Image: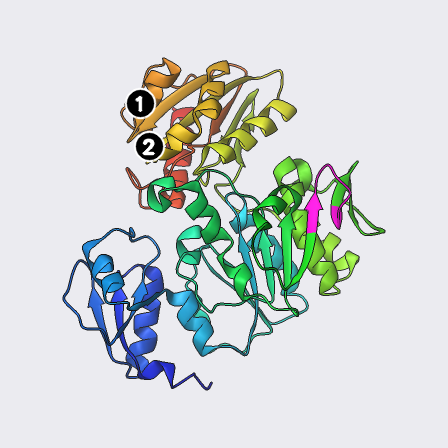
Amino acid sequence: MAWNNVFLKNKFVLYGMGISNKEVEKFFIKNNINYLVVLDDLDIDNNYVIIKSPGIPNNTTFLKKCHMLNLLIINDIELFYLLRTDIKYIGITGSCGKTTTCSVLYNIMKEKYKVGLCGNIGIPIFKFIKEELDYLIVELSSYQLEYIDKFRVDYFIILNVYNHHLNHHQTFNNYINAKMSVIKNLSLDDTLIINDELNHYLRGREIKCKVFTYSLSLKRDAYYEDTKLYFNDERFDISNIEYFKYEFNKENFLSIFILMKLLMIDNKLIIDKMKSYSGLPHRMEEIINFNELIVINDSKSTSFNSLNKAIDYCISNYDDYELNIIIGGKIDIEEIRSNILLIRKLNSYNVYCYGENKVLISKILNIKYYQNLCDVIDNVNLNIKQVILFSPAAQSFDEFKSYEDRGEKFKELILKKLNN
């Protein structure tokens, strides 16, 4: 595999050593690339390229120095692209549903193409630095997109945008601009697939690429109507497919549907793969459905919009059950302020609140708070006809290593209590 050796003659700083930069370091070591590791602060000159880990805040002392020196600050995705322009890229972003959408797309495309899956889904892009691929699907968070410069994708999907990560981005406009950052690099040969509700965010931006839109309620390039998906005049029957029982899955799948038709993937393959798709853990995962007790693990929920979608699903499917909701974790104060109306809607249900901002949330809802997730489960009554929805609407880092760790702990606690 031939790299872009000219760019690799730079001196590099790996700023932060999360999983993405650890994979870059392996590549640097194997190829004798000059680099430094910075975890906190360091005085450097103006000869370095900074590779920033996505989770590091933008206001650190080190980053301020880098900006003052006009250093190039990028991330592992941008670096990978500068080295590998021989691959076709599919980028997927959005506030809710990115990981599931990427996973569904990958499971279908791998039957026809050599395809990789990486990015925010938890697989560093540099895992594929030596791979011969037709396509690379990259799940893109706003943290990754804000340091994009040259990165270009052949197909860019934007699912949805809600108030999210405002403590990091400071303003909603900054968040939007991060989500849309790739658009400026798209050419006439590239394609943007965007939720119809987001069209107004394209105003004032230079759009050179082809644009396809989709909607659940309007007839666009792809739309949903009465258990069927439509792409132009083509109909795709989705009745009796488990994945489509969630309304938000139908909407996000419309974006995949457009892409699959553009890639000329036939309906039979789509149907077969969707029938066998079992979903990802910690995303509306029904872990108990027994004796009128339904327990749903939605630990992946990190925003009030994802919680709201989960509530809508429960109301639609279990309207004669009492709904008990468990929320909490590391919630941005700005996110609480900007979603105050969604939070107040929770007064209609029985809410258990724990986590870093439990006191503030409990005051807004005028409810009791609990010290931690274990304390919540100790106080949950499992002997009534009910749905217990664990949809935290928060990041997990106050108490857990990840949303996966949080989801596994929730399942362990619930099953232990049920079996006692």
Q: Earlier in the sequence, mark 2 or mark 1?
A: 2
- In magenta, the rendered stretch is 213-222
> Residue drawn at (52%, 48%), measured in percent from left and top?
94
Residue 107 figure quarter: bottom right
In this rendering, the answer to whether 289 lies above or below 131 is above
Task: Report how many numbered discs are placed on residues in the image.
Answer: 2
Where is the C terminus found, in terms of image quarters? top left
Check disc 2 and report the residue beneath it.
333
Check disc 1 and report the residue beneath it.
360
Residue 50 figure quarter: bottom left
Residue 367 figure quarter: top left
Helix, strand or loop under label 2: helix
> Residue drawn at (79%, 36%), measured in percent from left and top?
226
Report the front residue among 418 and 146: 146
Percent x, y for residue 330? 32, 36
Task: Name the outermost residue toward the left.
Answer: 43
Q: Residues within 10 Å of mark 2 (few under 14, many from 20)?
A: some
Judge from the rendering whether residue 274 lies leftward or rightward of residue 411; answer left or right: right
Find residue 24 and name its label.
Answer: none
Report the front residue among 368 and 155: 155
Q: Residues within 10 Å of mark 1 (few under 14, many from 20)?
A: few
Callouts 2 and 1 close, C-beta under 8 Å: yes
Percent x, y for residue 337? 38, 28
Report if residue 221 lies within the magenta region: yes
Rounded to the nearest whole Å, what is the CA distance between mark 2 and mark 1? 9 Å
In this rendering, the answer to whether 125 lies above or below 33 is above
Identified by mark 2, the residue type is: Ile
Magenta highlight: main SS: loop
User: Can residue 129 be seen by looking at this rendering?
Assistant: no
